Image: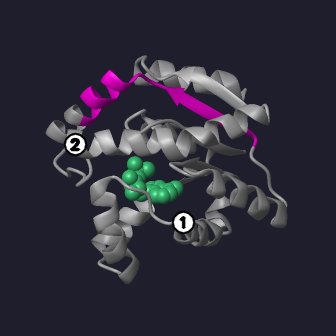
């Protein structure tokens, strides 16, 4: 099973992806986590990505697509995968379609985790205050930019899947377990 988890920053995509990969024995592909690994390992890509991520802006489509192309063909994806935080632009979504066609795969479901903006800010501020391992981009100023970028560049992707009749939505303002339950209902 190949899924896309869709939603604004702080919607809980990562949390839900972790629950689903255990349940279905599939791989989580989080472009944000992959980029943070590059930053932590101080690679050339990591160094270039850090300043962009610290502003809450998007990394170029070309870089993201080449990361995805390598990742999606790895062995641990043979049972399926969950894309978390990708695609984030229309260009990425269209590239993904072409790539999947080439390797004879398809996306089974695109699931939107829907949350409102006030709750997002609260969640990110909590995440920043509770976590020992604070993400550099978890603060309210950067989050505001991440939400602006989400609306401008990523919302069109939602429309794209909606037009293709592929989109299903769950209410992300419920407890984590209830959100998982609703996602599982959509998948079974
Ligand atoms: P995330 O962990 O998904 O919130 O991503 C953290 C940051 O990594 C984002 O704010 C972007 O700067 C970058 N990033 C992650 N995924 C993508 C993507 N698909 N396209 C462009 N930039 C991305």
Q: In the rendered view, does 164 fall on the left or right side of 155?
A: right
Q: How many tags in the picture?
A: 2
Residue under the point 58% across and 51% down: 89
Snapshot quadrant of residue 166: top right
Where is residue 162? Give x, y as percent. Answer: 71, 32
Query: Callout 1: helix, strand or loop?
Result: helix
Q: Is residue 188 above or below residue 85?
A: above
Q: Residue furthest bottom?
A: 44
Name the foreground residue: 147 vs 186.
147
- In front here: 159 or 49? 159
Q: Residue at x 65, y 69 (%)?
A: 69
Q: Residue at x 58, y 20 (%)?
A: 182
Does dot 2 land on a helix, a strand or a loop?
A: helix
Q: CA distance from mark 1 to mark 2?
A: 24 Å
- Residue extending farthest to the front is 152
Q: Which residues are magenta?
A: 108-124
Q: Which residue is mark 2?
A: 141
Q: Position of residue 19 (x, y in %)?
A: 50, 37
The residue beneath circle 1 is 64
**Does residue 47 appear in this view?**
yes
Q: Quadrant of the N terminus?
A: top right
């Amino acid at each position: 099973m190949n899924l896309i988890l869709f939603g604004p920053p702080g919607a809980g995509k990562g949390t839900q992806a972790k629950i689903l990969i255990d349940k279905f024995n599939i791989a989580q592909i989080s472009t944000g986590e992959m980029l943070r690994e590059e930053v932590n390992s101080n690679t050339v890509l990591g160094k270039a990505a850090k300043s962009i991520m610290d502003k809450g802006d998007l990394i170029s489509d070309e870089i993201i697509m080449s990361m995805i192309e390598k990742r999606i063909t790895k062995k641990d994806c043979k049972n399926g995968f969950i894309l978390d935080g990708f695609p984030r632009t229309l260009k990425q979504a269209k590239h993904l379609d072409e790539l999947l066609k080439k390797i004879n795969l398809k996306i089974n479901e695109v699931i939107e985790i829907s949350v409102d903006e006030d709750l997002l800010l609260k969640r990110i501020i909590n995440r920043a205050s509770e976590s020992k391992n604070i993400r550099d981009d978890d603060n309210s100023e950067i989050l505001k930019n991440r939400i602006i970028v989400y609306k401008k560049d990523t919302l069109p992707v939602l429309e794209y899947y909606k037009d293709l009749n592929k989109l299903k939505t769950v209410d992300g303002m419920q407890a984590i377990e209830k959100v998982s339950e609703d996602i599982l209902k959509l998948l079974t």
